[in-house]
Amino acid sequence: MAWMVWTTPTVVFFVAIAAMLAAMTTWEIISPTVERKGFLPISTTRGDRFFIGLLSAAYIHLVVVGFTPLSIWLALGVSVLWLMVLMRWG
């Protein structure tokens, strides 16, 4: 893995995604999901909202890295906050 030159924020980001996928899988096995309608314009399941949250996190990180001098840690924090809002009320 040394050829990839992993930085600490990158490792934290991907470890967090892997941990969330494992948690979502466990949650789905224990308590199967049902569709519901939140502030999103479609009915979604937990998995749908999680996928939308991961896509949003990718775009948030791309915007921060590509267009601002802000720290990537800020992008991670915003992504986590957005995912929590999306999972609860989306």
Image (tube, grey):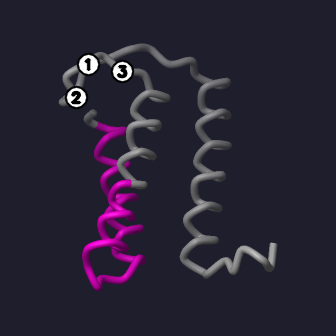
- What label sits on residue 77 in the rendered view? none
Residue at left offset 64%, top offset 71%: 11
Residue 77 position, x and y percent, is 37, 68
Mark 3 in CB contact with mark 1 (< 8 angstroms): yes
| Three-letter residue code for mark 2 | Leu
Is residue 3 positioned above or below 38 on the image? Answer: below
- What label sits on residue 40 in the rendered view? 2
The quadrant of the image that shows the N terminus is bottom right
**Residue placed under numbered mark 1 in the picture:** 42
Callout 1 secondary element: loop
Callout 2 secondary element: loop
**Residue placed under numbered mark 3 in the picture:** 44
Residue 6 position, x and y percent, is 67, 77
Which residues lie in the magenta part? 59-88
Residue at left offset 36%, top offset 69%: 75
Q: Residues within 10 Å of mark 3 (few under 14, many from 20)?
A: some
Mark 3 in CB contact with mark 2 (< 8 angstroms): yes
| Three-letter residue code for mark 1 | Ile
Q: What whole-number distance in Å separates the C-alpha atoms at marks 1 and 2?
A: 5 Å
| Three-letter residue code for mark 3 | Thr
Residue at left offset 67%, top offset 24%: 29
Please tell me in which quadrant of the rendered image residue 16 appears: bottom right
**Horizontal placement of 79 versus 15: left or right?**
left
Callout 3 secondary element: loop
Q: What whole-number distance in Å separates the C-alpha atoms at marks 3 and 1?
A: 6 Å
